[in-house]
Image: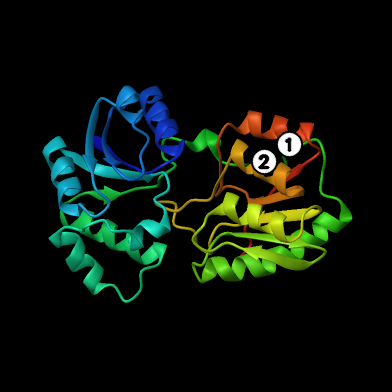
Amino acid sequence: MRYGLIAGNGQFPFLTIEGAKKAGVSLSVVAIREETDKKIEEVAERVCWVGIGQLNKMISFFKKEGVTKVLMCGQVKHTQIFSDALPDLRMLRMLFRLRQRNTDSLIGAVAEELAKEGIELIDSTFFAKEHIAQEGVLTKRKPTATEAENIEYGLQIAREIARLDLGQTIVIRAKACVAIEAMEGTDATIKRAGMLARGKLTVVKVAKPNQDMRFDVPVVGVPTIQTMIEAGATCLSITADKTLMFDKQKMIDLANKNNICIVALKNDW
């Protein structure tokens, strides 16, 4: 069985390649020209570069490589949907069939196109299980009473926006919503919150109801904590068993150094 990887931006594709190598698996990688770090060529054996809309080229590469299972790892910015990238005919036909162009619809449609060719899109964390957050308080400090109240309030809002596929992150202060994620991503949302109400912020990031682990899995890392420090945020709540933590120990160490609490809670939806 041969595995393929659709690599977006960030660290996730590299962790996946590393995990696959540990498992004795060599990945055939499709790198997205507008998103993927060029260093991917230094760690992957076989790489095919495609434009954001070159769906047919991607599928043709996987078929040539004999790939039957594919992972989609790393973010592709939502704003790329509205970029000047020129989609191929297969992508145009796919987009034309969609009633809406949110993340689930778009990537779900790509999964259908892959399936037509006998290629299965599988759990994106398949080779990265060790990076998934486990339930509990992950730092030295647990949430204060105020932070716990912010988390409880924030979860109500965050779950709703996640259900609507509008974003996964919300920033709370004194049980009031300061910022809600749209297309800009988690770190940009936290920065915006810091500009609006610096200090004493609680960040709540959730998985979607019935989170599809094949794509758009919640991710946090050292940059998340660095952005929280800049914004004056003191607590981060994430979904246990559904959130990837990149450079987990470095992330926790940085949080501890700055008296930031990280807690992973079970999704009870």
Three-letter amino acid code of the residue under disc 1 = Ala
Residue 114 lies, in percent from the top left, at 22, 54
Residue 80 lies, in percent from the top left, at 36, 56
The residue drawn where x is 11% and y is 39% is 64
The residue drawn where x is 41% and y is 26% is 18
Circle 1 — which element?
helix
Q: Which mark is residue 255?
A: 1
CA gap between label 1 and label 2 equals: 6 Å
Q: Which mark is residue 225?
A: 2
Three-letter amino acid code of the residue under disc 2 = Ile
Q: With 96 as the anchor, is 224 left or right in this view?
A: right
Q: Closer to the camera, 159 or 91? A: 91
Tell whether label 2 touches label 1 (CB within 8 Å). Answer: yes
Q: Is residue 242 visible?
A: yes
> In the rendered image of this protein, does residue 86 appear above or below residue 49?
below
Q: Is residue 136 visible?
A: no
> In the rendered image of this protein, does residue 100 appear above or below residue 154?
below
Crowd around label 2: few <14 · some 14–19 · many ≥20 (10 Å): many
Residue 57 lies, in percent from the top left, at 15, 47
